[in-house]
């Protein structure tokens, strides 16, 4: 497994981000923990340092592009470099478009898309200078297959995938790897905000992924880079089927997907 690397992780205070940080720390890497909840970051920092690894807790609001640029430079001066950036921060609110709160829409794009692009933009010059690095963007199966009540969230993940694929081609003549991770639903606090009614979780709970398993598979990408990691495979098969036969898929599955 990857060791002696400096790994930056956004959204590290809870959920998948927390598990990613713990998994990275187990392997002796230096972990830069980025999120708004500094109290949780410091608690996580102590756990990682208790395992014998270095960790830094840094407040970062992913919706503030000016802060992103400033914090990036501060971290590079303090830590020295960035070997891996895992753009994990993001959230969703599941609601039908006619009921959508525009503040939620703007905030989802600000964090899930604009913030991700801004941090990547700030980090890339440092990776290009050392001519090595790895950017891992946590997208979603929703970025391939949009479903009712998650149309706006899916739109943000479509954007993440489009950005990731274009960036990968821009970096083709460098030693910088670009990967997308597309998980299905993960058992995390994500749904505390996304699905306040609990309907979606109730319908798909049996298929939800374990956050530790997703974290382990993601960290393995550092040693074995590839363009995409799709979890679980059977769900990605459904996304592929949709891309091949969208009209048939919507006709057969549309009403069932509307139940969430």
Image (cartoon, helix red, strand yellow):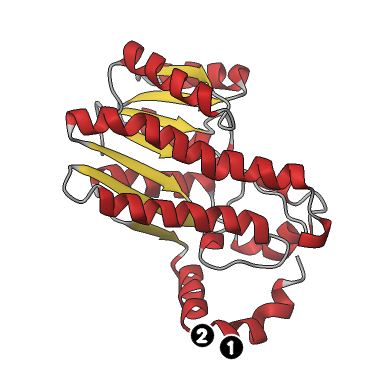
Foreground residue among 222 and 107 = 107
Residue 1 left/right relative to 161: left
Left or right of 90, for residue 131: left
CB-based contact (under 8 Å), mark 1 and mark 2: yes
Q: Residues within 10 Å of mark 1 (few under 14, many from 20)?
A: few
| Image x and y of residue 136, in percent | 38, 44
Q: How many marks?
A: 2
Quadrant containing the N terminus in the rendered view: top left
Quadrant of the image occupied by residue 31: top left
Residue depicted at 65% across the width and 86% down the height: 252
CA gap, disc 1 and disc 2: 6 Å
Q: Is residue 166 visible?
A: yes
Residue 98, horizontal then vertical, whole percent = 82, 61
Q: Residues within 10 Å of mark 2 (few under 14, many from 20)?
A: few
Q: Is residue 189 above or below residue 78?
A: below
Q: Which residue is mark 2?
A: 245
| Residue for point 68% across, 59% down | 150
**Residue 149 percent coordinates (x, y):** 73, 62
Which numbered marker is on residue 86?
none
Residue at 55% x, 81% y: name it.
246
Q: Which residue is mark 1?
A: 248
Vertical arrangement, residue 83 with respect to residue 160, above or below: above
């Amino acid at each position: 497994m990857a060791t002696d690397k400096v790994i930056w992780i956004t959204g590290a205070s809870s959920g998948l981000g927390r598990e990613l940080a713990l998994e990275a720390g187990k392997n002796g890497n230096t972990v830069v923990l980025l999120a708004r909840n500094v109290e949780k970051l410091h608690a996580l920092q102590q756990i990682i340092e208790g395992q014998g690894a270095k960790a830094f807790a840094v407040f970062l609001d992913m919706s503030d592009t000016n802060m992103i640029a400033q914090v990036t430079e501060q971290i590079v001066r303090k830590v020295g470099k960035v070997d891996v950036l895992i753009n994990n921060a993001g959230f969703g609110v599941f609601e039908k478009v006619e009921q959508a709160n525009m503040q939620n829409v703007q905030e989802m794009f600000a964090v899930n898309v604009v913030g991700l692009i801004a941090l990547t933009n700030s980090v890339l010059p440092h990776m290009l200078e050392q001519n090595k690095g790895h950017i891992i963007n946590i997208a979603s199966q929703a970025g391939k297959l949009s479903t009712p009540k998650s149309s706006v969230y899916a739109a943000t993940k479509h954007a993440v995938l489009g950005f990731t694929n274009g960036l990968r081609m821009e970096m083709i003549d460098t030693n910088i790897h670009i990967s997308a991770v597309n998980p299905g639903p993960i058992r995390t606090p994500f749904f505390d905000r996304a699905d306040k009614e609990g309907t979606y979780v109730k319908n798909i709970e049996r298929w939800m992924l374990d956050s530790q398993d997703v974290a382990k598979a993601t960290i393995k990408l550092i040693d074995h880079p590839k363009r995409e990691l799709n979890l679980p495979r059977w769900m990605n098969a459904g996304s592929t089927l949709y891309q091949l036969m969208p009209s048939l898929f919507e006709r057969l599955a549309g009403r069932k997907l509307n139940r969430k």
